[in-house]
Image (cartoon, grey):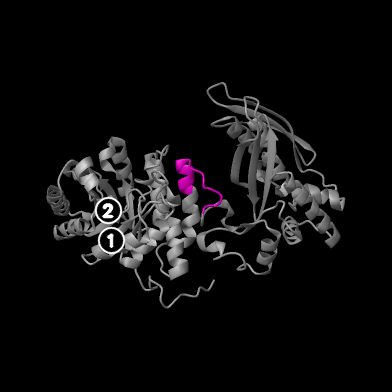
Amino acid sequence: MPVHYSTEQTIPSDRTVRLLDTTLRDGEQAPGVSLSPDEKVEIARALERTGVSVIEAGSACTGAGERQAISRVTDLDLEATVTSFCRGMRSDVDLALDCDVDGVHVVVPASDRHVEDKVGTSREDNLATTAELVEYAKDHDLWVEVIGEDGSRADLDYLEALGETALDAGANRTCFADTVGHTGPERTAEAVARLAELGPVSAHTHDDLGLGVTNALAAVSAGADLVHCTVNGLGERAGNVALEEVAIALAHVYDVDTVELEELYDLAQIVSRSTGVQLPPNKAVIGENAFTHESGIHTDGTLKDDRMYEPYAPETVGRERRLALGKHTGRAGVKATLEEHGVEATDGEIGEIATRVTELGDRGRRVTDADLLAVAEDVTGDDRERVVELLDLTATSGGAVPTASIRLEVAGEERVASGTGSGPVDAAVSAVREALGSAADAELESYHVDAVTGGTDAVVTVEVTMAKDDRSVTVARSEADITRASVEAMVDALDRLLAVEPEPLAPADD
């Protein structure tokens, strides 16, 4: 999609800007997040595929488990520079060296609050300690970045002196750190410009004021050529600046390339799954709603011109466009969704279906593909015979291994199967796949559970999206039993997907 750039833009398109990812260190400091060595390896590999230049793999001083994880990452022999966070202590550098990292981030206090109150030292002694640490790290052939902690609240003359001391001692670069997300773009630009006069400078911003991306761009405009980020904006408090947001902002607004943009969504999904932190639906770039259209006006416009209501094509960041159903869905959206599922309807029938979909939305409920297809069948008089139907389900989880047995009717034939899993839902899903055999080779794209009522008798709604070949379908089911709701939703989704299969379903043991 062509973008018109201003001749007066503050970041010229020929700038070289790289991204440093600190998901494995600063991101892991988000409350409730703890990554295993295997998860750190998986994320590091995804970051490498994305083309991130520097990967901060952790903080070696944390403990033996953290050092094992960092060593696992360094053993991958990645193209990216792999680093460790170090406090202003020689022992931290030694621990990082034990992990065979390429470099270290030496974090020293910059503001008087941190110099005097946190560390209990003086400005002069802090400068001397910084120089000694940098010289020690460089003597051991490490790439060194010195981060002035709380730099956004530091006296800028002292921040400049700290940067000059670090570079004179041999540091590769300094970093402006808005440690508590305190400042705005003007102060950021002023501080970074002064540091950039001394040598290479990075920016480390947080999103406490919602200014993470703004401050990162201000830093780049002022001379920073490396931006610290985390995937999905993970981090302490409101989080760090989001890698995907910085990458797309630099690419789309300023035509500055940093990473492989088409890898961003897969990277976001991997981090979300590993950390257990779900992606907010309205999150820029990687949220579920970022390329989803429900409004009739927007849907109609998008179907006529896919650039009508999107700043850039979803494929740019590894996404796909989606049309959602609800109270705002118009005729164009209904027609497009029906065509996607191979359903034919006259203009009059489409109008009636759209009206009923609006009525469902007016009741405050999410309208799924299955709801739309059921309405369409009623309006068109097309009595579709089910391909797969759930007859019986039994699941137990009291023993050492959760088990489930299931009875399905598949194309008029009864099939029985059992399965085991990490929990009753997993066991029941395994049983369904066993019963259907190769016919169940559909991908579970999403699985959401929401409590509809409170108390011990709460009803839950399970919503699944399943895809097979180039088709996908979303189904929601509500039950008091989460296992039954999950299986019913999955079976109904498979029923819809298999309804258009040209060949008869093979027996499960084929």
Asked if residue 278 lies in the magenta stretch, the reply is yes
131 and 76: which one is in front?
Answer: 131
Residue on which disc 1 sits: 191
425 and 170: which one is in front?
Answer: 170
Q: CA distance from mark 2 to mark 1?
A: 8 Å
Figure check: 320 above or below 373: below
- The circle drawn on residue 151 is 2
Which element type, helix, strand or loop, lies under badge 2?
helix
Figure check: 179 above or below 300: above
Farthest right residue in view: 381
Q: Which residues are magenta?
A: 270-283
Q: Position of residue 501 (x, y in %)?
A: 73, 51
Q: Position of residue 461 (x, y in %)?
A: 66, 37
Question: Relative to residue 269, is residue 157 drawn left or right?
Answer: left
Q: Position of residue 310 (x, y in %)?
A: 58, 64
Question: Relative to residue 67, is residue 343 drawn left or right?
Answer: right
User: Is any atom of residue 380 visible in this view?
Assistant: yes
